[in-house]
Image (cartoon, rainbow, N blue to C red):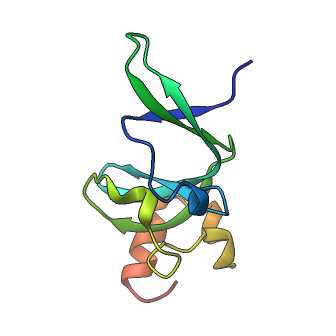
Amino acid sequence: MPPLRHFTRNFPKRAAELTDGGSLYWVIGGVILVRQRVLEVRQDQEPDGTACAALVLDPKLVRVEGRAMRAFQGWRYLEPKDAPLDLSAQGGGAAEMPEAMRRELAALGLL
């Protein structure tokens, strides 16, 4: 079975940083909700022969503190200080709450 990969046209300039604990952050419905650790960056090829890069991803999805964000290409350059916190780091069961409830409690300053 091939590894889980996400394809992108250009090889990332900061590939070494990506594989040293970097993550791909997924924007779902205008909100960053989960991340996946990048394990490897490989040169690859589209079915038509066009060169591309393959980001080999950890299959584990890590829920993060939701943050409104339009779809963007800069996901691979999120600095640690700009990245949303993992929900598991918040404690108090926030990771198990439904996302809508968690957002409402956060907006009220209760999370």
On the question of residue 96 being in view, the answer is: yes
Q: Residue at x 36, y 81 (%)?
A: 107
Q: Residue at x 49, y 82 (%)?
A: 81
Image spot of residue 15 (x, y percent)? 54, 54
Image spot of residue 78 (x, y percent)? 44, 68
Q: Nearer the viewer, residue 54 or 62?
A: 54
Looking at the image, the residue that sits furthest to the bottom is 109
On the question of residue 100 being in view, the answer is: no
| Above or below: residue 86 compared with residue 13 | below
| Above or below: residue 37 compared with residue 51 | below
| Above or below: residue 16 compared with residue 2 | below
Image spot of residue 7 (x, y percent)? 46, 33
Q: Residue at x 47, y 74 (%)?
A: 79
Looking at the image, the residue that sits furthest to the left is 70
Q: Nearer the viewer, residue 67 or 3?
A: 3
User: In the visual, does 89 lie left or right of 50?
Assistant: right
| Quadrant position of residue 2 | top right
User: In the visual, does 42 lie left or right of 100?
Assistant: right
| Above or below: residue 59 compared with residue 20 | above
| Quadrant for the N terminus in the image | top right
Image spot of residue 46 (x, y percent)? 43, 18
How many marks on residues? 0
Looking at the image, the residue that sits furthest to the right is 1
Q: Nearer the viewer, residue 86 or 1?
A: 1
Q: Residue at x 34, y 59 (%)?
A: 74
Q: Nearer the viewer, residue 89 or 49?
A: 49
